[in-house]
Amino acid sequence: MPKKVTPIEEKLRRYSVAENGCWEWAGAKDRDGYGVFGHHRGKQLRAHRASYSVNVGEIPDGMMVCHKCDNRSCINPDHLFIGSSQENTSDMVKKGRKFITKGTLHGMSKLSDKDVAEIIELRKSGLLLKEIAARYGVTFQHVSLITHRKSWRHL
Ligand SMILES: [Zn+2]
């Protein structure tokens, strides 16, 4: 049995595949360069969002659908991902540090990678969190985070 094609899927076929794998939206585009799919509940629906919800799944409330490829008119679901802020996320992906919270880049840190390694050793040797915190001039919570490896995951 062939899969039943809904009108939304039918409409989403208006694209051409570019050399780099992008699905270039062939329909109208808005002034920001995003493909315009149509209107949904009185709001303009962008083609990449329509593609994401049809091909991948529902978009969580208030979340953005971002492009890994930085091509706003692209609707290839493989190039789309959910992010909380379009600008920030695409910027981070470009710099290759999404999901990597490098210690020295981490805002709350004034510790070097060497300090962190020492802290983990001290904790293993039985020193209390508050003693370690006092020694390095950081908060108790910070030491706790480090010893649980929630930050500094690259070590
Ligand atoms: Zn693309």
Image (spheres, rainbow, N blue to C red):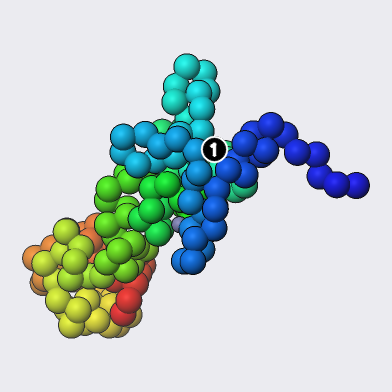
Q: Judge the density around disc 1: few (<14), some (14-19), many (≥20) Cα neighbours within 10 Å.
A: many
Between residue 60 and residue 31, name the one nearer to us: 31
Q: Is residue 31 above or below residue 1?
A: above
Q: Check disc 1 and give the amino acid type.
A: Ala
Residue 83 at x, y percent in the picture: 39, 47
In the image, farthest residue toward the right: 1
Residue 57 at x, y percent in the picture: 60, 43
Can residue 71 be seen here? The reply is yes
Tell me which residue sits at (31%, 38%) in the image: 32
Position of 93 with respect to 21 (left or right) is left
**Pointer 1: what residue?**
50
* Residue 7 found in image quarter: top right
Between residue 24 and residue 113, name the one nearer to us: 24
Between residue 40 and residue 142, name the one nearer to us: 40
Tell me which residue sits at (47%, 17%) in the image: 42
Q: Quadrant of the C terminus?
A: bottom left
